[in-house]
Image (cartoon, rainbow, N blue to C red):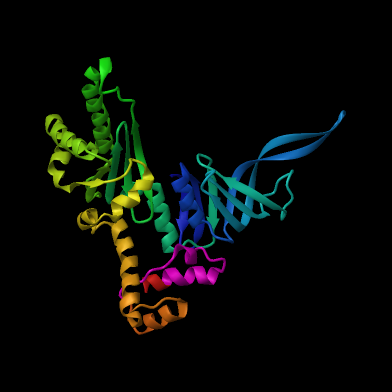
């Protein structure tokens, strides 16, 4: 996500953003709450009187709505915001209901009367996901690789490498090894470009068969040849794991693997998963020490009896302003 303008403080302010994919739209969906104001360029069909009668025409205009309803459709990569228009326009009456559609690569401006700590942190993470993504996962299979950065709040695909490999038999067999070498080189280039070793603690190479093992061997050998000092010094941070494919859906298999969990247990993504599992385990074994629900958690907080507090994103998106403000202050106290 790109941030084109940032005039935000806890007292209020505006932010101009450009989402660049579905992951960014998911962050925007969790950032916008009822009562916020959103401005964006949109197209509306208007009626014009001409000598030939009435004609319809699509006109580009700027609309601003005070948000009442929010809907996110991941399949079509679109957020729909419904509310009353508050930007004066010759074609749209003030106070009339309209729907704004937010899509990738179309900028919009978000205005809030109050930006809490979590809103500000979410914007920082969304605009610079590599700043908090301390786990890198390279998913590889025959002819396809995806490089992911996994953070506390989201997973971002930084690069996709896809090639057509020749057959192992027949006249094309002679070029197979050379094509594999070039395929692995492109993945290595992506690793050098996208992995910040000051942030990333572990790199998991996952995939079916021997693809992951061969890629790891290639990375270590080429790092020495190319004199990639950072790769050579951090070779111990690499670990291999099985995955059924190189697609994002297989990430769940990788993070669920006990061998991987043991190596990446200090990363933010795994800590979040582990915290939720610890809660369910304690609830099953000693339910007096695990509580849930607003009143029960508040009572435990009054006694200073909270070791780990888990709060759903849904509560930060409450329609009631007082409730939205309550939970950030509760987590900070």
Q: In the picture, residue 189 is in which quadrant?
A: top left
Residue 123 appears left or right of 203: right
Q: In which quarter of the image is the C terminus?
A: bottom left
* Residue 314, magenta (yes or no): yes
- Identify whether 99 is placed above or below 328: above
Q: Residue pushed farthest front? A: 169
Q: Nearer the viewer, residue 120 or 245?
A: 245
Q: Report the residue at 15% width, 43% height from top.
A: 235
Q: Residue pushed farthest bottom? A: 303
Where's residue 30, x and y in %?
48, 57
**Could you tell me if residue 5 is visible in this image?**
no
Where's residue 130, x and y in %?
32, 47
Where's residue 32, x and y in %?
53, 56
Q: Report the residue at 58% width, 52% height from top.
A: 38
**Could you tell me if residue 52 is visible in this image?**
yes
Q: Nearer the viewer, residue 105 or 297?
A: 297
Q: In the picture, residue 91 is in which quadrant?
A: top right
Q: Report the residue at 37% width, 49% height from top.
A: 155
- Identify whether 286 is placed above or below 207: below
Where's residue 158, x and y in %?
35, 40
Q: In which quarter of the image is the N terminus?
A: top left
- Identify whether 118 is placed above or below 302: above
Q: Report the residue at 61% width, 58% height from top.
A: 69
- Part of the protein shown in magenta: 307-329
């Amino acid at each position: 996500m790109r941030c084109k303008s940032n005039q935000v403080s806890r007292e209020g302010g505006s932010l101009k953003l450009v989402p660049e994919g579905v992951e960014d739209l998911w962050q925007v969906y969790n950032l916008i709450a009822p009562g916020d104001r959103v401005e964006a360029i949109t197209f509306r069909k208007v009626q014009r009187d001409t000598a030939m009668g009435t004609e319809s025409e699509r006109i580009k205009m700027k609309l601003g709505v005070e948000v009442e309803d929010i809907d996110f459709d991941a399949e079509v990569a679109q957020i729909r915001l419904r509310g009353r228009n508050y930007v004066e326009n010759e074609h749209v009456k003030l106070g009339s209901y309209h729907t704004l559609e937010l899509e990738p690569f179309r900028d919009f401006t978000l205005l809030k009367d109050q930006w809490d700590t979590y809103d500000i942190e979410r914007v920082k993470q969304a605009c610079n996901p590599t700043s908090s993504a301390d786990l890198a996962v390279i998913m590889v299979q025959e002819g396809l690789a995806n490089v992911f950065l996994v953070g506390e709040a989201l997973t971002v695909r930084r690069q996709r490498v896809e090639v057509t490999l020749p057959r192992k038999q027949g006249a094309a067999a002679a070029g197979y090894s050379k094509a594999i070498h070039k395929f692995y080189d492109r993945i290595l280039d992506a690793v050098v470009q996208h992995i910040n070793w000051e942030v990333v603690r572990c790199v998991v190479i996952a995939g079916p068969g021997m693809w992951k093992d061969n890629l790891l061997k290639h990375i270590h050998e080429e790092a020495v040849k190319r004199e990639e000092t950072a790769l050579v010094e951090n070779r111990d941070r690499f670990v291999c794991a099985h995955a059924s494919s190189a697609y994002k859906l297989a990430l769940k298999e990788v993070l669920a693997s006990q061998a991987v969990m043991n190596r990446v247990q200090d990363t933010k993504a795994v800590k979040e998963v582990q915290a939720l599992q610890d809660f369910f385990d304690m609830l099953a074994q000693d339910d007096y020490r695990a509580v849930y629900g607003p009143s029960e958690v508040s009572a435990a907080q009054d006694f200073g009896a909270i070791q780990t507090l888990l709060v759903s994103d849904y509560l930060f998106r409450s329609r009631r302003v007082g409730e939205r403000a309550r939970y950030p202050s509760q987590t900070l106290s």
